[in-house]
């Protein structure tokens, strides 16, 4: 009886081990590279142009081409949803930091999520503040932005 139990246990371990090897090999054969959607960099560039624009009326006119109707920005100050609240948040940030502009790095893309690191500051010190935005994208529009500050 003891011998049968030991053999069964050994067989279970061997089978479990071969399953793990099989799963590992299968996973390794999956292609993980994914190209960014065409026009993503231009979409991100237009996003930062909106955030650098000091004219609230002009900014709002550009929203429909860049953001979905339910676009939101989540940052440390809270959650702003929709054109009116996002536009107000931009005005508030610009009022707190007159003359500052965003200088983004090129967009990075990973399976439906876009990431951009950026600097924010006056023209003579454009990286005074550093941060990162993580975007979701759908149907050629930004649907959300989550803002992280590098302290």
Image (cartoon, rainbow, N blue to C red):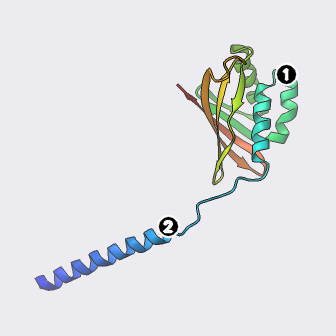
Q: Residue furthest front?
A: 124
**Label for residue 68?**
none
Label 1 with label 2: CB-CB less than 8 Å: no
Q: Which sits in the foreground, 125 or 101?
A: 125
Residue 135: % across, % down: 66, 42
Residue 2: % across, % down: 11, 82
Determine the residue positioned at 46% across, 71% down: 25
Q: Residues within 10 Å of mark 1 (few under 14, many from 20)?
A: few
Quarter of the rendering containing residue 14:
bottom left
Residue 101: % across, % down: 73, 23
Relative to 24, is 119 above or below?
above
Q: Which sits in the foreground, 141 or 109?
A: 109
Determine the residue positioned at 67% across, 34% down: 73
**Label for residue 28?**
2
Quarter of the rendering containing residue 97:
top right
Q: Earlier in the sequence, mark 1 or mark 2?
A: 2
Determine the residue positioned at 80% across, 36% down: 46
Which image quarter holds the N terminus? bottom left
Residue 106: % across, % down: 69, 40
Q: Is residue 111 left or right of residue 92?
A: left
**Label for residue 55?**
1
Determine the residue positioned at 70% across, 16% down: 124
Relative to 16, is 47 above or below?
above
């Amino acid at each position: 009886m003891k011998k049968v139990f030991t053999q069964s246990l050994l067989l279970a371990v061997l089978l479990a081990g071969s399953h793990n090897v099989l799963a590992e090999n299968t996973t390794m054969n999956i292609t993980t590279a994914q190209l960014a959607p065409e026009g993503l960099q231009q979409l991100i560039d237009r996003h930062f142009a909106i955030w650098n624009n000091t004219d609230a009326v002009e900014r709002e006119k550009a929203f429909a081409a860049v953001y979905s109707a339910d676009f939101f920005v989540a940052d440390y100050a809270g959650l702003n949803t929709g054109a009116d609240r996002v536009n107000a948040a931009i005005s508030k940030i610009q009022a707190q930091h007159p003359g500052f502009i965003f200088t983004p790095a090129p967009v990075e893309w990973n399976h439906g999520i876009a990431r951009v690191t950026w600097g924010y500051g006056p023209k003579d010190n454009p990286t005074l503040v550093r941060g990162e935005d993580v975007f979701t994208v759908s149907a050629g529009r930004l649907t959300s932005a989550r803002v992280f500050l590098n302290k």
